[in-house]
Image (cartoon, grey):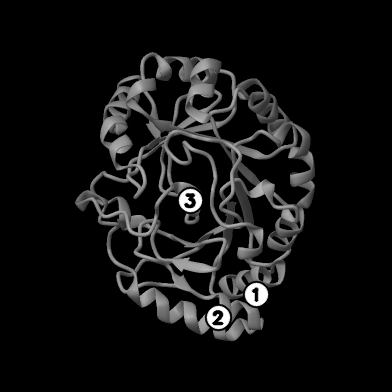
Amino acid sequence: MLEDSFGRQFHYLRLSVTEACNFRCQYCLPDGYDGPTSEHFMTLKEIDTLLQAFARLGTSKVRLTGGEPTLRRDFIDILRLTANTPGIERVAMTTHGARMEKFASTWKEAGLDQVNVSIDSLDPRQFAAITGQDKLRSVLRGLDAAIEADLEVKVNSVLLNDFSQSRLQRFLSWLKDTPVTLRFIELMETGDLTQFFNKQHQSGSPIKKQLENMGWQPLLRRKDAGPAQEFFHPDYAGRIGLIMPYSKDFCKTCNRLRVSAPGKLHLCLFSENGIDMRDLLSTGNVEEVIQFLQHALSQKDATHYLHEGKTGATKHLAMLGG
């Protein structure tokens, strides 16, 4: 089992397969994607070596991220490879959802268990203003297709000051009959968007207090769960989660590592530069990758240092999928 010097065990890998995305979300790629092309990202063979190493070290959950992971032409091959790696028990992905209506059942057949979809507003005009794409209705149809395909569905919504008015009430009404988990995520500062962060950051604490006052109750976390504090209410089909990276002891339960599309190990979303492992992956030697990972984990810090304004090498969230 992968364990750091603070006694934290790591069951969960967030694997970025591309940095490219065709949305222009205000908090991520407001000017659109202008980064490396696909030949700079890990090949299927290199991903296979990586997955085998992590699985042998106790990783049981893998999340495929981007950018937008489905933009890779070989995405289905990556999905099948991940699901068929011995030791990997749960496969998730994060997507903007624009392709979900067409492909949800295909992803399920290929081995996907869970899908996280970014929906920052249920108001079509707000959605278009935030994402740069007028595709809310298409994404919501995709959400229905994912539920019909028997995928576990979670919805990610970034908290932004400009779009907070009445948004919680609209989402609560939606969750009455919609069996998904909605996660409100505090905006995190990245290198390219410091001014945007200072203007738009909103704490999740007031929402947590409001939910508790309304009778929402906390859920126990699975060992491979992400960082969300999740809540349920007997009168609602859906659940609510809060991801608050600026809250006290947020990093105490960290159980996930990240690998970027170019093949760098990131011990934290906001670590300095990532540790290049592409040469190791290209050899196909799983045992050497295992030794590399065990040694690298000794360098993991206790916290992300976001409170000190340190954002590391993360210029925008598409680099590592959040």
Tell me which label, 2 or 1, sits earlier in the chain.
1
Can you tell which mark lies on residue 289? 2
Can you tell which mark lies on residue 225? 3
Q: Badges 2 and 1: C-beta atoms under 8 Å apart?
A: yes
Picture quadrant where residue 263 is located: bottom right
Which is more foreground, mark 1 or mark 3? 1
The amino acid beneath tag 1 is: Thr
**How far is the residue under mark 2 from the one under mark 1?**
8 Å
Whether residue 138 is situated above or below residue 298 in the rendered picture: above
Tell me which label, 1 or 3, sits earlier in the chain.
1
Whether residue 50 is situated above or below residue 18 in the rendered picture: below
Badge 3 crowding class, 10 Å Cα cut-off, few under 14, some 14 to 19, many 20 or more, is: some
Which is more foreground, mark 3 or mark 2? 2
How far across and how far down the image is residue 97, in percent? 64, 35
Q: Residue furthest left?
A: 308
Whether residue 213 is situated above or below residue 243 in the rendered picture: above
Viewer-proximal residue among 113 and 46? 46
